[in-house]
Amino acid sequence: MTEPKHQDTTNNSLVKFLSSPIARALFALILVIIIGLIRNADGSFFKFETHRDMLRHISRYGILACGMTIVIITAGIDLSVGSLLGITAVIFSLTTLHLGWGAFLAIPLTLLAGVGCGLMSGTLIGKFKLQPFIATLAMMVFARGVAKYITGGEKITRAIQKGNEFVYVDLPGIFAFLNSRVLNDSVAVVTIIFLICLLISWLLLDKLRWGRYLYAIGGNEEAARLSGVPVRAMKLLAYGISGFFCAVAGMCQAASEQQGDPEAGQTYELTAIAIVVIGGTNLMGGRGSIWLTLIGALTIGYLEKILSINAVSEAGRLMLTGAIIVGAVLFQGTKKR
């Protein structure tokens, strides 16, 4: 009599797992990898460098997605992450290249700028009750405008004008470090930074009381407030951390391009949201995981790399990515019902 019960329990557990967000996220990733195995571009997909470069490319978007995940769990959205990446890349380049500051001064200032912008968005949302879409849309436009104002619309490069001449300064060591590879040239530093950001997010969401507060706010904000959750403070925390990750990604972007471009990060917010959605974190808030975001980042990263090595046009890549986002959201809704 015990064997059927055990079998039913096993079947129920299997069905529960297959209907879970992580199973759906893994299914999407495996499907993309299978496509890569089939459409391998004459063996390019099987080369180690392909996977290493994919991780390096997707890491900056993944860092932004870490903050986006935390914000979405609170039932919010952050449309400003691309612009915050741009302004922090400008600040980091300006202080290191043109002002000659060392990393120990430039990095804290850049992080402070990112956190400050995030806290401004969190204040508008938590204190003044603006919709996250409106508040972060305003920050997106404002931060981009500040970046262009600081630079005069020009890129911050190694070339510094002195009189009628241009003097080229040496590339700071921090730029070379952030753009380097370690472990026998097999892992990019930016990929390691992405993994550290994932670890920080996991500790916040899974190991600290603040994480439970963030999930509670996303599940039912009024119930969380009545239960004693400091809703306003937690929203400040969520958007402040998102700004922090934007600054980290901005420094990586500046090092990669060896300049501070006020236009950098345009549409990056769309990729960050796509990573979170394809990973399976619920856009309505209250449910999700940073490890789902990692799976989403790998899925987007491999998808873009496969399309790239197969010489698919940028227009085709964008259309396919958009279709996949819609499919992922519809798939979540179907399983929920």
Image (cartoon, rainbow, N blue to C red):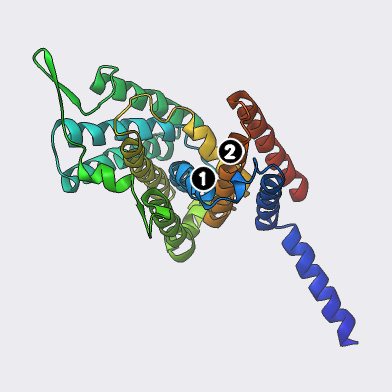
Residue, far bottom: 1
Residue type, mark 2 in image = Glu
**Amino acid type of the residue tagged 1 in the rendering:** Met
CA neighbours of label 1 inside 10 A, class few (<14), some (14 to 19), many (20+)? many
Labels 1 & 2 near each other (Cβ < 8 A) = yes
Identify the residue under disc 1: 54
- Crowd tier of the residue under label 2, counting other residues whose Cα lies within 10 Å: few below 14, some 14–19, many 20 or above: many
- Residue 288 is left or right of residue 93, and the answer is right
Q: Which residue is mark 2?
A: 304
Instruction: Tell me how far mark 1 sits from mark 2, CA to CA.
Output: 8 Å
Give the farthest residue toward the top: 164
Give x and y (percent) for residue 218. 55, 49
Residue farthest toward the left in the current orientation of the protein = 163
Is residue 282 in view? no
Q: Is residue 170 left or right of residue 220?
A: left
Quadrant in the rendering for residue 116: top left
Return the mark for residue 260. none
